Every structure is written in structure tokens, then in C-alpha cells.
Amino acid sequence: MTDPYSILGIRPDATDEEVKQAYRELARKYHPDRYRDSDLADLASEKMKEINAAYEEIQKMRSARTSKGGASSGTRTGNSSYGHGQNTLYAEIRILINNNNIREADRRLRAIPPEERGAEWHFLTGCVLFKRGYFVDAQKLFDRACEMDPYNREYQTARDQLGRQANDPSGYRTSEQSSFNNACTCCNSLLCADCCCECMGGDLIPCC
């Protein structure tokens, strides 16, 4: 495999946040949905696979380095704090959501003990609920994520964009109205496509 750092266009000594930011920017640029019905669709799909693989490889390398006693560059923002092990897990969950593997993302999030559920957990769980069409529950989780990490712009954007949907409650439903693990009905609004763009790595991402 080509040097994963080169694929993301960053240096090996980049911080975890810089790695994440580089991944998001490339994912938005090359997400296949942006090239749907285009001659570049196949090329974009292959590029996206390469970007995902590079990001996963970097996370694995850093996780292995930390487990061997190396210096940790865990992330800490606002009231949210987690080290490399959890950071890697959340990165994997983001990739699952990006690939519309919502069931597996849901399973991994539920497996995290309640006492370890920080701002990132609430945000990603909100994204899962949002992708399933449970907008009310997603809003509550986005609100909680922002309370725990008030300086995270990604959380704020998701919360604010979904909050505007409250003026048109016809599409709102909660997880109490049907099983959490049922497949969602299709969300065709632009809000559904745009709200989780930072998390999912693209501008127009279909529901699960």
C-alpha cells in the first residue's frame, strides 16, 4: 500500500485532528455520490476506497504505537476526552456510517459502556438515528453532544441544521414509535443529505 499519509496529503507527525480533517476534506471531494451519473463515478469510488483504507491504516498504526507504550496523541476538546483506543473505534464507526453500514455502527455504539459515552458517542448515535429517520431523537443527541463539547463546530452544524427542520414536523418521528433497528424510510430532503456531511464525508449521502 502507498504511504497512507501521502494519500491523505499530510505529514506522519500530523496530529489526530489534522488526520481527521484531511480525511474529511478528501472524503467530501471524492465521495461517489457527487459523481453519480458521471463518467468519473467509478474513479471516484476507487479513490474513496483508497482514502478510507489510508485513514484506517493510520488509525491502526497509531493505536498499535500507543498500546506498545508510545506517546499518545489522544484528542481532548471541551468536555469531551478520549484516548487512542476509543478514538480509533469512533473513527471506524464514522467509516461504517459513511459506507451506510448503519446496523454495524449501531451495534458498536451500543457496546460502549454508558460511563464512556462522551460527546462523540452522542453525536455519532445521533447520526445513526438521523439516518434511520428518527429526527427528534437525533436532535436530542446532537444537543447533548454540543453541551458536552460546546466548541465543536461539526456538532453545532448538525444540531442547527436539524433544528431548522422543527418548523416542518411532518417528517419527525422518534425511536419509540418503531423498533430502533428497523430500516428507515427514505429521507429525500436536502436536510437529510446535508446535515451529517461532516460526519459522513460527503454532501449527498442516501439513507441506510
Image: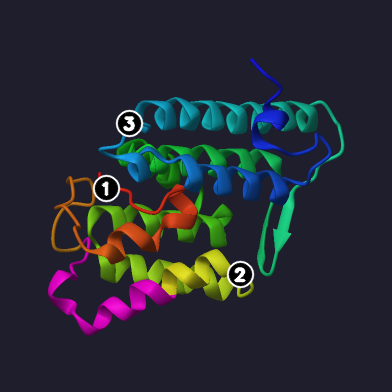
Q: Which mark is residue 206?
A: 1
Q: Quadrant of the C terminus?
A: top left
Secondary structure, mark 3, is: loop
Spot occupied by residue 120 in the image (x, y as percentages of width and height): 54, 57
**CA separation in Å, label 1 and label 2:** 27 Å
- Residue 174 painted magenta: yes
| Residue shown at the point (48%, 70%) measured from the top left | 157
Q: Nearer the viewer, residue 204 or 144?
A: 204
Indicate the quadrant where residue 31 lies.
top left
Q: Which residues are magenta?
A: 160-175
Identify which amino acid the numbered label 1 is placed on.
Pro
Identify which amino acid the numbered label 3 is placed on.
Asp
Tally the marks. Answer: 3
Q: Is residue 202 left or right of residue 54?
A: left
Dominant secondary-structure state across the stretch colored magenta: helix
Q: Which mark is residue 39?
A: 3
Q: Nearer the viewer, residue 53 or 143?
A: 53
**CA separation in Å, label 3 and label 1:** 20 Å
Spot occupied by residue 147 in the image (x, y as percentages of width and height): 55, 75
Q: Is residue 138 left or right of residue 21?
A: left
Q: Is residue 72 left or right of residue 135?
A: right
Identify which amino acid the numbered label 2 is placed on.
Asp
**CA separation in Å, label 3 and label 2:** 41 Å
Spot occupied by residue 76 in the image (x, y as percentages of width and height): 73, 59
| Residue shown at the point (57%, 69%) measured from the top left | 153
**Front of the two marks 3 and 2:** 3
